[in-house]
Image: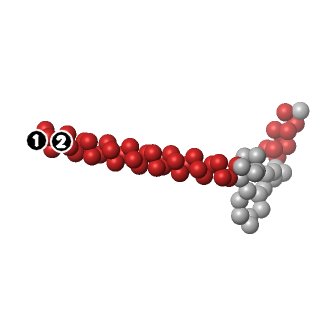
Amino acid sequence: MQDQRRSFLKKTLSVGAVAATVSVGAIAGDTGAKTAGSNGVVKGKSKKKEILYTKTANWDAYYHAAV
C-alpha cells in the first residue's frame, strides 16, 4: 500500500516539476520579446477609445482639493 502511495507521489512531483519548468520558461521568453524594442510598453490592438477623464462634479471637487 505504501509503495503505491510513494510511486504515485514520485510521479506527481516529477510531472509538476516539469510543468513548472516549462511554464516559467514560456513566461520568461514572452516578456523578453515584448519589451525588447518598446521600453516595457505593451501596445495593444484594441479599436476602443481609452477614456481617462470625464468631467464630473466629483472630479472637480477632487482637483480643487488637490491644488
Residue 6 left/right relative to 66:
left
Residue 57 position in % (x across, y down): 82, 46
For label 2, the residue is 5
> Against 34, is 17 above or below?
above
Q: Measuring 66% from the left and 52% from the top, which residue is drawn there?
A: 33
Disc number placed over residue 44 in the picture, else none: none
- Tell me the quadrant of the picture where the N terminus can be found: top left
Work out which quarter of the rendered image holds the C terminus and state it.
top right
Residue that appears at 81% across and 44% down: 59
Residue at disc 1, secondary structure = loop
Report the front residue among 1 and 44.
1
Disc 1 crowd, CA 10 A, few/some/many (<14, 14-19, 20+): few
Colour treatment of the image: secondary structure
Helix, strand or loop at disc 2? helix
Q: From the viewer's perspective, tell me whether residue 39 is left or right of residue 10.
A: right
Please tell me which residue is depicted at 79% across the width and 44% down the height of the picture: 58
Going by the numbered disc 2, the residue's amino acid type is Arg
The answer to whether 18 appears left or right of 36 in the picture is: left
Q: Quadrant of residue 44?
A: bottom right
Q: How many marks?
A: 2
Q: Which residue is mark 1?
A: 1
Question: Where is residue 14 shown, x and y percent of the image?
Answer: 33, 44
Q: Position of residue 53 (x, y in %)?
A: 81, 51
Question: Which residue is at the far bottom?
Answer: 47
Residue 66 occupies quadrant:
top right
Q: Give the amino acid at mark 1.
A: Met
Q: How packed is label 2: few (under 14 Cα within 10 Å), some, or many (20 or more)?
A: few
Q: Position of residue 26 (x, y in %)?
A: 53, 51
Q: Nearer the viewer, residue 64 or 44?
A: 44
Tell me which residue sits at (65%, 48%) in the image.
32
Residue contact between numbered discs 2 and 1, judged by CB atoms under 8 Å: yes
User: How far apart, in angstroms, are the residues tagged by discs 2 and 1?
Assistant: 7 Å
